[in-house]
Image: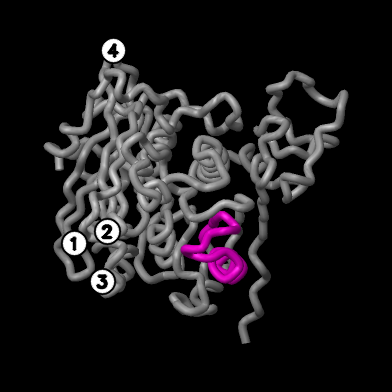
Amino acid sequence: MRALLLALILLSGPAVAQVPASVARIDAPELARLGPDAVGIRALHLVGHKADERDLDVEVWYPTTTTPGAETVVYSGALTPEHATDEPARFSNPGIAVLDAKPATGGPYPLVVLSHGHSGTPQAMAWLGENLASKGYIVVGPYHRDPPITDAAQFAIAVKWRPLDQAFAARSVQTLARDKASWLAGLVDPGRVALIGYSMGGYGAVSIAAGRAKVEGLKAVVALSPWGGQARYSVWSKPELAAITTPMLMIVGDRDDVVGYADGVRSIYESTIHAPRYLLVFENAGHSIGMGPASAETYKTLWGLDYFEDPVWRKDRVIAVNLQMITAFLDLTLKGDASRAAYLDVAVSKGNDTVWPDGVGSQAYGAISTGTPPITVWKGFPRRGVTGLELRHDLPAARDPAP
């Protein structure tokens, strides 16, 4: 594992000239920006000892102090090709993290377990791991050892192990946080935990919230394009979803033909009736909204490109919107920052219906919305930044009285 990571770092020449995906572009909303901390990355190997545990390699992103001139990592990987005889779909993107940097001393920080999609890799979600680490989170990304996504006969293996892996990763890091000999001691707060999952990772996160695996200190779940909501799979019963009380943020494209929208993610959302929850929808977007950007080598096949890029949405804009909403949600639920609610509880749910009247607020072209009337553009976004978005917010339904 360490040899693999070392082989991927420090490519500082022209081949890696693009901007790291964790760094917000000029049109990004305000909470998408990097936080005040520099970012470190370390590899861990977790050893399973029980029937519901298996060995896992994980990446850990964490806050560190700035090291002038330190070289940063490059994230590379190879994803399952369309046909067994094809070359894998390769990617290589620069990051901001410094390998094995000294951790910051401002902890303990909340713990986030970041779970990739089926037969994916945490390196394809480094955009989120790095950005959150810069804001004072410890982000643990397991390599889930899935069978190839094209092998339908082994699909049940991924389904079985995903929530177990996520729970094991959280449990292992919580144990290390209590071990004075570990570098994670004092760095991780084991009582403040969030699960973030994309696609199969979203399935695992929802399953844990529904009680299929146990994570102590679970305060929040973020599910990007989670699999399992389609009626034909019947992954969870209605009572299981209704029993969830953990705050949830679900993110989906309404043209997602992999996990489904109305018969899919929205049905999960509408069934988790006893959880405080948000649903962020990218209109006309497909399934790739949880992945980082494609790189030059990814463009060799449409199959490979579609892992990363959406036919309609710019990937840097998708990432920026996700960073804004995920940051607000985690700051609210894990850090108790009540001011972040204003970024989530919007007055107008459909971005296309929001207004910024002439003569109101700053008229600078790149002004950021305050979210206060008569401006209804969502707080933190530039004037045109919510076009094509929808954000729902539902409070927990009242429970029936006990018989």
Residue at point 33%, 69% (across, down)? 159
Find numbered disc 1 in the image and state the secondary structure of the residue it sits on. loop
Q: Are marks 4 and 1 in contact (CB under 8 Å)?
A: no
The quarter holding residue 245 reads bottom right
CA distance separating discs 2 and 4: 36 Å
Instruction: Of the two numbered discs 2 and 4 on the same chain, state the one appearing first in sequence.
Output: 4
| Residue 391 left/right relative to 295 | right
Q: Are marks 1 and 2 in contact (CB under 8 Å)?
A: yes
* Position of the C terminus by quadrant: bottom right
Residue at point 16%, 33% (across, down)? 7
Q: Nearer the viewer, mark 1 or mark 2?
A: 1
Query: What residue sits right under mark 4 in the picture?
Result: 69
Q: Are marks 3 and 2 in contact (CB under 8 Å)?
A: no
| Residue 28 left/right relative to 395 | left
In depth, the one of 53 and 95 nearer the eye is: 95
Query: What residue sits right under mark 2 in the picture?
Result: 168
Query: What residue sits right under mark 1 in the picture?
Result: 54
Query: What residue sits right under mark 3 in the picture?
Result: 154
Instruction: Of the two numbered discs 4 and 1 on the same chain, state the one appearing first in sequence.
Output: 1
Spot occupied by residue 279 in the image (x, y as percentages of width and height): 61, 56
